[in-house]
Amino acid sequence: MAKHETPLLDQLESGPWPSFVTDLKQQAATKPECWDILGILELSFKDRITHWKHGGIVGVFGYGGGIVGRYADVPELFPGVEHFHTVRVAQPSSKYYSSANLRQLCDLWEKHGSGVTNMHGSTGDIILLGTRTENLEPFFWDLTHDMNQDLGGSGSNLRTPANCIGESRCEWSCYDTEEACYKLTMQYQDEIHRPAFPYKFKFKFSGCPNDCVAAIARSDISVIGTWKDDIRIDQAAVKEYIAGNYPSNGGAHSGRDWGKFDITKEVIDLCPTNCMWMEGGELKIDNSECTRCMHCINVMPRALRPGAEKGASVLVGAKAPILDGAQFSTLVLPFIPMSADNDFEELVEFIEKVWDWWMEVGKNRERVGETMQRVGLPTFIKVMELEPIPQMVKEPRSNPYVFWAEEEVEGGFERDVEEFRAKHAA
Amino acid sequence: MAKHETPLLDQLESGPWPSFVTDLKQQAATKPECWDILGILELSFKDRITHWKHGGIVGVFGYGGGIVGRYADVPELFPGVEHFHTVRVAQPSSKYYSSANLRQLCDLWEKHGSGVTNMHGSTGDIILLGTRTENLEPFFWDLTHDMNQDLGGSGSNLRTPANCIGESRCEWSCYDTEEACYKLTMQYQDEIHRPAFPYKFKFKFSGCPNDCVAAIARSDISVIGTWKDDIRIDQAAVKEYIAGNYPSNGGAHSGRDWGKFDITKEVIDLCPTNCMWMEGGELKIDNSECTRCMHCINVMPRALRPGAEKGASVLVGAKAPILDGAQFSTLVLPFIPMSADNDFEELVEFIEKVWDWWMEVGKNRERVGETMQRVGLPTFIKVMELEPIPQMVKEPRSNPYVFWAEEEVEGGFERDVEEFRAKHAA
Amino acid sequence: MGYNPDKPMDGRISDLGPPHYEQFFPPVIKANKGKWLWHEILQPGVLMHKSETGDEVYTVRCGTARLITVNFIREICDIADKHCDGFMRWTTRNNVEFMVDSKDKVQPLLDDLKSRGNKFPVGGTGAGVTNIVHTQGWVHCHTPATDASGVVKAVMDELFDYFTSMTLPAQVRIALACCLNMCGAVHASDIAILGIHRKPPMIDHKRITGVCELPLAIASCPLGAVKPAKAEVDGKEIKTVKVTVERCMFCGNCYTMCPAMPLADPEGDGIAILVGGKVSNAKSAPKFSKLVIPFLPNTTPRWPETVEAVKKILEAYAKDAKKYERVGEWAERIGWEKFFEKCDIPFTEKSIDDYRLAYNTWRTTTQFKYTSHIK
Amino acid sequence: MGYNPDKPMDGRISDLGPPHYEQFFPPVIKANKGKWLWHEILQPGVLMHKSETGDEVYTVRCGTARLITVNFIREICDIADKHCDGFMRWTTRNNVEFMVDSKDKVQPLLDDLKSRGNKFPVGGTGAGVTNIVHTQGWVHCHTPATDASGVVKAVMDELFDYFTSMTLPAQVRIALACCLNMCGAVHASDIAILGIHRKPPMIDHKRITGVCELPLAIASCPLGAVKPAKAEVDGKEIKTVKVTVERCMFCGNCYTMCPAMPLADPEGDGIAILVGGKVSNAKSAPKFSKLVIPFLPNTTPRWPETVEAVKKILEAYAKDAKKYERVGEWAERIGWEKFFEKCDIPFTEKSIDDYRLAYNTWRTTTQFKYTSHIK
Ligand code: SRM
Ligand code: SRM
Ligand code: SRM
Ligand code: SRM
Ligand code: SF4
Ligand code: SF4
Ligand code: SF4
Ligand code: SF4
Ligand code: SF4
Ligand code: SF4
Ligand code: SF4
Ligand code: SF4
């Protein structure tokens, strides 16, 4: 393939941040189609507009997802990217890899594709960026047969679930996010690969309310670790913090001189529920008032830890703004146990209940959060066979527009207007 | 008229709170139709339902408002309340009266009506409760000729404006609420008496953000006093508070032992903007951060006073929940001068601009707040010829759904799809 | 002279407006308007305002039933004549205020008021319960779902001690509206008593022709539950409407527009309790009241369920809130889940919003407190 | 063997899912999973986690462009092989992490990374700016209103010092999405860079037949701006759609549903800046980002206006916010009017919501601060 002039892109080779332009140019030495990637991108930089056509339905046999079709709208100029489909490869939990595994994947992608990737896509997949239609099946063959790996999701199906690093390297994780993500991904392979839903559906698993995988903002079912009992306090370590011997916030603020650590200002006063105080040199917490926001624990990781009775909150319905505005997930199950021993039974049961209902009543291209908005939260709770509890709302309704069912109202709805008129002249 | 048995109502004669039943019974001695009021009410207590018919269009010649028609739906049982129209008499600012004036009104109402009143209606009028159609004109004649007084508003017109007591007995009033209310009421007599609006319209005037006439919740135009400069501090008095020599909150909490006054806990920590602190025994306020919420002034009335450069904030659109849910008024003019010397020119100009627009675009039975919601706040601001400022919103929009006008966008909206296709193959 | 029905327009005067307020000012008010410096509540119901001139005005505030007769007003005038140079005023919450210009005139006034039985309870100031703003109810209106004056009397009898004292964490404003039109503006009250209907309107086909403009009736329904229909009346087919009852949320707007669609019903109607609203901008911005008890029956003549509910909330608040904390500020600080628990109010799905802006009330955070609601 | 196009289903394997994560754990992770006690950020980009077993794991975090080649991944593998027993991971924000099991292995690793030019900047931890979550842009997608990787490179070059240091009041999360679909989930970021269109779709009548289901295209528009229409194509009347341009707010949903309705345009497209969102539940609940700059042009190749705007906001925040305060918490504390003033951003009516739940954003209190906006 021809090398193209890229005067605009070249300007992105300077500067301290790693340059994808430099990287692509270097790759072009062995994968000449990278020149066409650079070329078409340069044209976009010049024209200030994309040069990719709308969609394109391609895939591998038997799967409805995992490939996003893409064609250039100037193929004659850049034949190397005439077809430029992406392949979404399911990532392992927490995105740990061995070099052996990755090298094999690189070889495969060099063989069947452009050699360009995203590590990782926004949903969490390994994104292999750009290949021709005729390469898809051979790539898939090798991926499954040689690497024992598989595609992720796209289309109106379950998308590749993702998780925060959790117990494997984080002291705060309230359940095994990796195992939950893995187990559910395995259990729902069919839902991932074969579109059967009204629209896309996402799971994300965070080990604690810090929510390092942004579950509450980006997943239809957000599973976020929490606990039931008391925050565990090491009073000796509290003293070390007060003495300034341990860095606040695990050293996260060490780049600036914020003055001496002040437990009142930095912890007690910032606790959103005001449930902490010092007493006799000890830090006290009224745990019944604590909303487990993590702040105090974040600031004093050596002194405070989540409680020991752990599990997760399950929230439903996050999504991006199209069409009605963005939604965060809504708290539906305040606490469930999360145990690999029972295959996350409580969660699985809930997920399937949500799906059964949504697949029945969800409209085409309606995310579950939108369906919830359409039917109303009270109805959603009822169909989920849950007790309505105040934890599901920030505050009670302020309008008086309550629906009453006929059976709730003494005497029912049927009335005789003649009888009424007998007592009330018109 | 016959005396009726009122076993249910009789039970409302006991107890420490003044009993309207006792009062009505006593009045019945000279105004026997009060027996029928008691009678029909007793029937409602028995039937647990109202016994008044829907509406009824009655009034005095030339006025579209001021009277609410009402007929009993059991007139044969209670002929004394067969007609039972209410008359809304415009109250004086702040509802001060002389006994001479009130006695005259009482005599009039005893002559032409039931002798029963509400002091006052929710909007602010003197409500004269219950008379016959044929009494309306004679009453109105006497009211205007003998008392030089007038009816208030009802229907789709300007409702009787109301105000808090303001400067006449409150140290915090930032403008003369009584004069503003009076002037505007006089100026808009036509708008009060002759329906010309899409729906009702209310003005309320409070002298400061404590809003003792509930303007922000209950009026289409809410004029609420505020100031521009610094809170006036008497440091000597601050010291008296700290010493416990002056009662906190003007003595409003003196019924319970809340402990010694603590300026930090009770004032500084409760300031919503955290803009107060003690320094060298003096109370300091960063007035540029103050939102003039009144809390500190409320708690230490002898030490703190509103600034000297006074005026009002104007907010628009409050209403009750029918149909779209209740609305508070929205801040539209953060600060205007309020001076009787220029006849409240700035306010008057704004009001008339709002009316001109609302009378043109408002739908039938659409409150101005609803019209604002329908067209959107940006449009409202534009038609009011105001600069959009961040003070009008709590926070900027979180959705990305911005309208752009064609002239704002380089090259306009017209494009040639053929030209586009020449560069972008389909 | 007087009104002459034969010449109704002769000598007619109109557009006079209200009397000018100043003529009704007590002298001390007139002399000191705009000059007040500070005030103090000397005891429940008794305020003192100090002027920069050195003058003082003492105000004695008395609760009233609002529904009062001319007899009663004349008694108020008697008192004003005797103690206050013949002047008085009413507050924005229907209390009557007597003003005197020196301290020694206060006690005689108080004694006089006291001597008149339960007619003039002194109070309603500061951190207490003041008069209940309310509406017409069964005394006058056509759409109420409950009475007004009767409920108010029952509630105020029970809360009387809070009217005559100042022991609460902050002022508590109670309001009552007898239907969703909310003339009592209960949408922003610490505790709101709201009359609600729970049965869809009946259609009086016999009457609808003539009294209703059908398109207006149809357009009136915010949920589109009113639809055009036909019916037979006296053997003739007429145009009328029907109501899809499952879509009705009993707002009564159709009845406001169309007298042939009454909704009131002895069993269907009753009271909902909302809490946590406020109007003032002090500390926190104005807040809407929130629905916490969806229904209590109209148990005449004393509405014991409603009285009990209001009292329970007030007492839980009195016990738990901090000084200066309004009911809504308290509920938000402790969290609504704790509010329900502390007030011992069962939580129902009826408190979960499903109207227009409902999503804003959903809890979109993991922050919550454990309560007995979580099993 | 390999794929045989003649027998595509022969020997096909499917539904394998991802590889089990455990096989990729570095030994120290495997041994200590679930046993970690606490962590400390030793220097920007270097974390230490301590286990109850006494073990420690040292993590070195490096920024990447996310858009990387297999060449580059192999270099990462080389580093992992050399220092980390052949293991590594990526974070949820596209940084790569190298882990070693003792402190003395950290410096050699850092030295090695440094020796590789600007490829492996170490940082992205604590109270700094970490990698920008972003999307495809002009590299791959069909609907972008701006590029992704190019903008990110330009912004990160400018903010580089914030990536390699921890001097901010709190973590600052920047995200970019190239269109309103928001694959970059910018709706909850401290600073969000959002590609926006500003011209209504064109209708390619020649192409619409066949590629579009007209009812779906019509239903796709949230504002009902897409209407059925007719057009003449090659002398034949066809069914097509038209757009009421005054009702279009450029969301692009019609184009998603119908390829014959492209909106992208060199002049029309550009970037909006939103700020103040957050995801974590720490201290305050998650917040949406708010639109503060409605439009900046696509000035390739380095988007100076966008870079400048992001920097200005970040610096105003760095200067003014308190320790631990996220951008949105800061803006709410000081008030949005002060935010605009301190960031020197002109306020426009475009920041005032007029979509579905708009009323909730109106200021319904008298509480405000005086700023230069009030004349
Ligand atoms: C590749 C990826 C962006 C990236 O560069 O990382 C991506 C790319 C596309 N997204 Fe996305 N989305 C990607 C993650 C997301 C996310 C983030 C997430 O999953 O955490 C979101 C926001 C969260 C959410 O689901 O709401 C997201 C919200 C959307 C939407 C709006 C959905 C909505 O309900 O509002 C669309 C529009 C649609 O579905 O038609 C969309 C559509 C698309 C399409 C398929 C374009 C389209 O209009 O059909 C893009 C294909 C681009 C291409 O040419 O490759 N994408 N998309 C991400 C998937 C990679 C992966 O599998 O790991
Ligand atoms: C008399 C009064 C209640 C009282 O006992 O004090 C009252 C009584 C009625 N109001 Fe009201 N409203 C009264 C103050 C209010 C207020 C409070 C205020 O003005 O501060 C409100 C709430 C604020 C507001 O304006 O939104 C209020 C909101 C309504 C509404 C709902 C309006 C809305 O936009 O949502 C209606 C329904 C309507 O207009 O059709 C209504 C309608 C009515 C009608 C006319 C009944 C009807 O459906 O047509 C009532 C006549 C009762 C009767 O038989 O006498 N009334 N009404 C108040 C007027 C007295 C006065 O002039 O001083
Ligand atoms: C007389 C009256 C004005 C009038 O024109 O009639 C009035 C008079 C005073 N108000 Fe008020 N307020 C009056 C209705 C209101 C209302 C309106 C209402 O309740 O419908 C409000 C808003 C209520 C709300 O927020 O829901 C109101 C909110 C306040 C506040 C704010 C308190 C707060 O913490 O939110 C103050 C300041 C304070 O009390 O510290 C205040 C303070 C005052 C002061 C101290 C002002 C002064 O310096 O004279 C007056 C005596 C207070 C007292 O009674 O304890 N006044 N005040 C009204 C008496 C009503 C009554 O009879 O009980
Ligand atoms: C590695 C990673 C998880 C993963 O599975 O990959 C991670 C790791 C840690 N996070 Fe995180 N967070 C990671 C993404 C996130 C995200 C998601 C995102 O940004 O998209 C969030 C939510 C962001 C938001 O709120 O907008 C997130 C919000 C937090 C917080 C809450 C901070 C706050 O004040 O709101 C903490 C606590 C803290 O830093 O004090 C935290 C703390 C931590 C700790 C200290 C947890 C621990 O004990 O190990 C880890 C090191 C923090 C650091 O880098 O300073 N992590 N963290 C992610 C690193 C991303 C990166 O490369 O920069
Ligand atoms: S979400 Fe919690 S458990 Fe997971 S990585 Fe972040 S801080 Fe750790
Ligand atoms: S986790 Fe949050 S709410 Fe709980 S004590 Fe700590 S700071 Fe307070
Ligand atoms: S609103 Fe302000 S000025 Fe008016 S009476 Fe109340 S406290 Fe005084
Ligand atoms: S008026 Fe309110 S905001 Fe201003 S200083 Fe006083 S308490 Fe603070
Ligand atoms: S609240 Fe309803 S029932 Fe009561 S007076 Fe107003 S309109 Fe009538
Ligand atoms: S009561 Fe309200 S919701 Fe029910 S039919 Fe009438 S207008 Fe519609
Ligand atoms: S944000 Fe829009 S343009 Fe960017 S990748 Fe997603 S769908 Fe494509
Ligand atoms: S861009 Fe959005 S608003 Fe505009 S026509 Fe298309 S779907 Fe409708």
Image (cartoon, coloured by chain):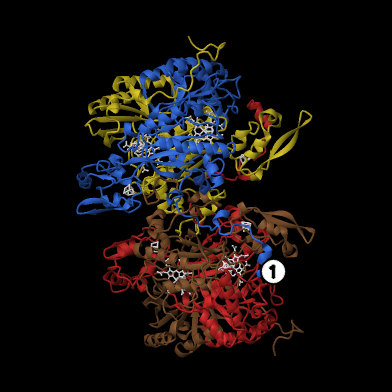
Chain colours: A red, B blue, C yellow, D brown
Q: Nearer the viewer, residue B409 or C42?
A: B409
In which quadrant of the rendered view does residue C168 lie? Answer: top left
Q: Nearer the viewer, residue B114 or D174?
A: D174
In which quadrant of the rendered view does residue D40 lie? Answer: bottom left
Residue at disc 1, secondary structure: loop
Horizontal side of D262 relative to D274 (left or right) equals right
Q: Position of residue B28 (x, y in %)?
A: 47, 18
The residue that label 1 is drawn on is: B426
Ligand 3 positioned in quadrant? top left
Residue furthest to the top: C1
Q: Position of residue A384 (x, y in %)?
A: 60, 58
Q: Residue B12, can we see it?
A: yes
Subunit ID for the residue under disc 1: B
Q: Residue at x 37, y 42 (%)?
A: B209
Q: Position of residue A121 (x, y in %)?
A: 56, 74
Ligand 1 within 8 Å of disc 1? The answer is no
Q: Residue at x 51, y 62 (%)?
A: D187
Horizontal side of B259 relative to D348 (left or right) equals left
Figure disc tally = 1
Mark 1 neighbour density, 10 Å: few (under 14) some (14–19) many (20 or more): some
Q: Nearer the viewer, residue C374 or A42?
A: A42
Horizontal side of B102 relative to A71 (left or right) equals left
Q: Nearer the viewer, residue D127 or B110?
A: D127
